[in-house]
Image (spheres, helix red, strand yellow):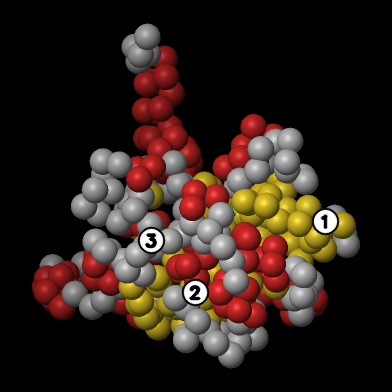
Amino acid sequence: MIKKAVIPAAGLGTRFLPVTKAQPKEMLPIIDTPTIQYVVQECVDSGIEDILIISGKGKRSIEDHFDKNYELESRLQEKEDEALYTQLRHIESMANIHFIRQKELNGLGDAIYHARFHCEHEPFAVLLGDTIVDSVIPVTQQLIDSYEQYGHTVIAVETVPPENVSRYGIVGGENLSNKVVRLNQLIEKPSVKQAPSNLAIAGRYILTPEIFRALEKTPRGKGNEIQLTDALQLLLKQEGIIATIIEGKRYDIGNKLDFLKTTVEFALKRKEFAADFEQFLRETIESIDRPS
Ligand code: G1P
């Protein structure tokens, strides 16, 4: 049983400046819902309600988002807006969320190391906030299923085109089935030449507490940061690691263009304005003057 999840959310969001100058990138909305709420929902849909968010400077609004807002709630009750009121009540009660601050930004590995007291005795899920996945079975649940089958650390992976391998952690190994690979290599943001495959780490993990010992021994890597991928490569010397090819559509919302594409796709799926929005898009594509 995986009962805990860790969501690292301390990063500066430099790829999204200037909007992230004074607001966390995790609060950027896909239409009307902050991205981190989709990630928390994935935990809940996978049966996890104990969530540790690794927070940092300037991230207070994430705490406020999952807190109770009495004033707003009573205003909605007065206006008899039952639907919105219910939505707000859902957000504050969807999970048991804890926060810990990462005071210095030393990379994803260091962020995960901050969870060591919370997750010392049991395996736990990690969900990176710059990925959301539309799938029938939540991706974290898919990983939990693999963990239960193999009893090893599990990493979500996805095939990416060669020109994108240098944006991700890339894994190599031996296929156990058409969706499970037993790993023999993990490398953070390799060149196409160095990459053992085009299977990219897709921002979801099931880790065991052994990762904390591995992180203690992990030197700074890519970007002079402590990389989770490097710690996993160290761990591989001791124990097996499984990669599961995820089933579902992954939205990489860590950069502006992909974020925009995600917003458009989600808008086209929203009943209340899908038809109008589609018509608007078609007309705009016909008529807009493109930048030269
Ligand atoms: C992180 C991980 C990388 C993974 C990626 C997925 O990189 O270090 O291994 O492939 O997330 O989004 P980041 O995007 O934070 O640089």
Mark 2, ligand 1, within 8 Å: the answer is no
Q: Is residue 119 above or below residue 232?
A: below
Residue 162 in the image, given as x and y percentages of width and height: 69, 34
Which quadrant: the C terminus? Answer: top left
Mark 1, ligand 1, within 8 Å: the answer is no
Q: Estimate how packed mark 2 is, as few (under 14), some (14 to 19) or many (20 or more) residues with alpha carbons within 10 Å.
A: many
Residue 68: quarter of image: bottom left
Q: Does residue 284 appear in the picture of this structure?
A: yes
Q: In what element is the residue under mark 2? A: helix
Q: Does residue 247 appear in the picture of this structure?
A: no
Residue 5 in the image, given as x and y percentages of width and height: 51, 76
Between 9 and 65, the residue placed more toward the observer is 9
At x 50%, y 82%, the residue is 116
Of the image marks 2 and 1, the number of the one nearer the N terminus: 2
Q: Is residue 241 above or below residue 276?
A: below
Q: Is residue 163 above or below residue 282?
A: below
Residue 285: quarter of image: top left
Which numbered disc covers residue 145?
A: none
Residue 59 in the image, given as x and y percentages of width and height: 27, 64
Q: Are marks 2 and 1 in contact (CB under 8 Å)?
A: no
Which numbered disc covers residue 113?
A: 2
Between 147 and 77, the residue placed more toward the observer is 147
At x 77%, y 75%, the residue is 239
Q: In what element is the residue under mark 1? A: strand
Mark 3, ligand 1, within 8 Å: the answer is no
What residue type is disc 2 on? Tyr
Which numbered disc covers residue 173?
A: 1
Which quadrant: the N terminus? Answer: bottom right
Which numbered disc covers residue 105?
A: 3
Between 38 and 128, the residue placed more toward the observer is 128
